[in-house]
Amino acid sequence: MEQVLNCLVIDDDPDVNAYVCEMVDQIPFLHLAGSYDNAPGALNRLESGGIGLLVLDINLPGIDGVTFASTLKDLPRDHIPRVILISGSRDYAVDGYKVDAVDYLVKPFSYEDFYRAVAKVRTLTNVPKTSPADEYLFLKVEHDLIRVNIREICYVESFKDYVKVFTGDQTIIALSTLKAMEERLSGKRFMRVHRSFIVNLDKIEQIQHLTIRFGKTIIPVTEQYREAFKAEFREWL
């Protein structure tokens, strides 16, 4: 049986709030677990866990949606919901991707727009976990989600409001921050070695004087990351 996602809606406009809640009720794999007109009011429910999706307005009274979304990382890992941001303006789209939102919808959006967004959430939530060799992540590239095998990533480079993800045969420019990528790759064989680079330790081809080489690419290990890097390669360095 398909997993049903508990969903919270946060929007201070009562008409929009009711409209989104009505759409949630129409989608079989969603269950409306609550609706709120401000972000702090929903915090206790989020802290109790079991919420798979948060539909979050950006322009809220008090703490705004983007700021609130950025605090969700402080919840226990299995309590952190997927987030769809909604707004009356396109001006905050990049900020939305900085907090790793699955999608960003501009009001007024249709049921079809909303369904496409929550379908992305369902895809991410129902990803089967088989073995480390099969682990992958989805990268946001314009309006698409691109699946990338984690083990194929050589390194990640910060690129303004995006990141460049380099694999053995392609370069993917994705909407994300380097910090968000660092969190997504946490616990795997990746390490931050520079304010602009994360590297896959298992893909390093050459190390010379604390400088890493991936083919023709040269990445220096800067001072604040050197001790941790040396610890990984202490047997050889």
Image (cartoon, rainbow, N blue to C red):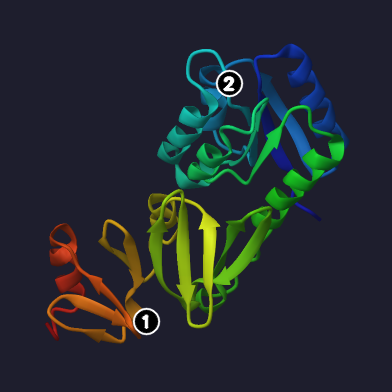
Residue 121 location, x and y as percent? 68, 49
Residue behind mark 2:
59
Quarter of the figure that contains the N terminus: bottom right
Mark 1: amino acid? Lys
- Local secondary structure at mark 1: helix
Give the mark count.
Answer: 2
Describe residue 109's horizontal placement relative to residue 132 as left or right: right
Describe residue 110's horizontal placement relative to residue 72 as left or right: right
Residue 170 location, x and y as percent? 53, 77
* Mark toward the start of the polypeptide (1 vs 2): 2
Q: Please, is residue 87 above or below residue 62 in the view?
A: below
Which image quarter: residue 234?
Answer: bottom left
Describe residue 169's horizontal placement relative to residue 180 as left or right: right
Give me the residue at 42% from left, 51% from top. 160
Quarter of the figure that contains the C terminus: bottom left
Residue 130 location, x and y as percent? 60, 72
Give me the residue at 70% from left, 29% from top. 33
Q: Please, is residue 18 above or below residue 118 in the view?
A: above
**What's the distance in space between the residues labelled 1 and 2, CA to CA?**
43 Å
Give me the residue at 75% from left, 30% from top. 32
Give me the residue at 37% from left, 81% from top. 203
From the viewer's side, name the closer residue of 111 and 39.
Answer: 111
Estimate how packed mark 1 is, as few (under 14), some (14 to 19) or many (20 or more) residues with alpha carbons within 10 Å.
Answer: some
Estimate how packed mark 2 is, as few (under 14), some (14 to 19) or many (20 or more) residues with alpha carbons within 10 Å.
Answer: some
Residue behind mark 1:
203
Work out whether residue 61 can be spotted.
Answer: yes
- Local secondary structure at mark 2: loop
Residue 191 location, x and y as percent? 30, 65
Mark 2: amino acid? Asn
